[in-house]
């Protein structure tokens, strides 16, 4: 199987798809066009903290020793920088994929405050991905949250036990079985060991819980982690295409990253509704951001998100007009130059 080293860039010319996969993409593209308008967006995950008290999923950067030393418990982001990302989502027509962070990252009242402020800045209810949530907490979150995403990673029972030893499937299964009045979504990683033939586990879970959305990621190996290679573009697009064909109305969000970003045209052909995980703030206005935009539009999609031009934005006015506490506005003003200086920098970091 052709796989990809996370340290090298994929060139679109090097992406080889078999005839069989190309036929599959023709079908998935048709199914997409029969069911959606072509409106396509960039989804941004907003992280609240780099800490996770579980920290033992074998593919996750939080499981590495280096991460644990650099990010001890309590290392969380300021409200100002989180809210700035929410403002970027609003101004640039990115969607907030979800608000997320590791287990045990902060007490619930703080989390609630983040959810409330992010939804206020963004101007609508948001998705949340913070693990299993108790019914009481769900009720408190309801005014600000429209959907719950669960990072299932894989639905293959044996592989799940191996890669997520402290995060069993059952509590999520139970949460979704009783969840009412919220949309439901899961996030899954392609490349953990389950094959296209194992996708029936995933299909069963989608059907059982009548999911509204799924986010797929191509595994990105991390230094010191258990995996050394991510899936080929061919393997990744086959997963997306098979999902699209089997679930014509399901919202499919496909993750990509800086080094894989030349694959996005194929992600569109496979039937993805949107992309996520492209490092849009670090790459804002760069040739890579322009390439991603072009590749999506070349597939006939109406790409509504702006990855390129912020020249007409009056940031001070945007912040002044928000209905949030003055202290948070002040934090946003302070963090703003850091972000704006990073725009157009083209850093090779994927964060
Ligand atoms: S629960 Fe999530 S954040 Fe924590 S180690 Fe596992 S994948 Fe990483």
Image (cartoon, rainbow, N blue to C red):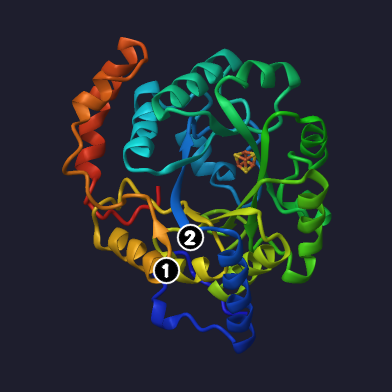
Label 2 CB less than 8 angstroms from ligand 1:
no
Write the residue at 63% across / 72% down: 238
Work out whether residue 112 or residue 139 is closer to the camera in this orientation and state it: 139
Left or right: 24 in relation to 67: right
Crowding around mark 2 (Cα neighbors within 10 Å: few <14, some 14 to 19, many 20+) is many
Mark 2 vs 1: CB contact within 8 A: yes
Work out whether residue 113 or residue 351 is closer to the camera in this orientation and state it: 113
Is residue 164 positioned above or below 240 on the image? above
Residue 169 in the image, given as x and y percentages of width and height:
79, 43
Residue 334 in sight from this viewpoint: no
Indicate the secondary structure of the residue bearing disc 2: loop
Residue 322 in the image, given as x and y percentages of width and height:
32, 20
Q: Quarter for ligand 1? A: top right
Work out whether residue 155 or residue 97 is closer to the camera in this orientation and state it: 97
Lower sequence index among marks 2 and 1: 2
Residue carrying label 2:
38
Residue 297 in sight from this viewpoint: yes
Residue carrying label 1:
300
Write the residue at 26% across / 53% down: 308
């Amino acid at each position: 199987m052709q796989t990809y080293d996370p340290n090298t860039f994929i060139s679109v010319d090097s992406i080889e798809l078999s005839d069989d996969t190309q036929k599959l993409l023709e079908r998935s593209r048709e199914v997409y066009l029969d069911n959606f308008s072509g409106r396509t967006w960039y989804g941004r995950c907003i992280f609240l903290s780099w800490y996770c008290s579980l920290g033992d999923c074998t593919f996750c950067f939080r499981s590495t020793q280096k991460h644990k030393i650099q990010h001890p418990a309590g290392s969380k982001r300021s409200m100002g920088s989180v809210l700035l990302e929410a403002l970027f989502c609003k101004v640039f027509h990115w969607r907030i994929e979800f608000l997320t962070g590791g287990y045990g990252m902060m007490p619930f009242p703080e989390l609630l405050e983040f959810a409330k402020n992010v939804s206020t800045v963004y101007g609508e209810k948001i998705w949340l991905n913070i693990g299993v949530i108790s019914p009481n907490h769900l009720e408190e979150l309801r005014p600000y949250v429209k959907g719950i995403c669960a990072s299932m990673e894989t639905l293959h029972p044996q592989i799940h036990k191996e890669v997520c030893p402290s995060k069993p499937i059952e509590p999520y299964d139970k949460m979704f079985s009783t969840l009412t009045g919220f949309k439901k979504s899961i996030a899954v990683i392609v490349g953990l060991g389950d094959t296209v033939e194992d996708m029936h586990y995933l299909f069963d879970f989608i059907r059982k819980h009548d999911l509204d959305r799924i986010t797929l990621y191509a595994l990105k190996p991390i230094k010191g982690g258990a995996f050394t290679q991510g899936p080929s573009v061919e393997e990744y697009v086959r997963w997306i295409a098979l999902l699209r064909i089997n679930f014509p109305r399901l919202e499919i969000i496909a993750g990509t990253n800086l080094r894989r970003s030349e694959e996005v045209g194929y992600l569109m052909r496979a039937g993805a509704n949107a992309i996520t995980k492209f490092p849009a703030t670090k790459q804002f206005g760069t040739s890579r951001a322009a390439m991603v935009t072009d590749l999506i539009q070349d597939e006939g999609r109406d790409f509504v998100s702006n990855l390129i031009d912020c020249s007409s934005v009056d940031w001070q006015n945007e912040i002044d007009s928000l209905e949030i506490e003055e202290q948070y506005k002040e934090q946003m003003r302070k963090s703003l130059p850091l972000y704006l200086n990073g725009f157009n920098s083209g850093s090779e970091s994927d964060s």
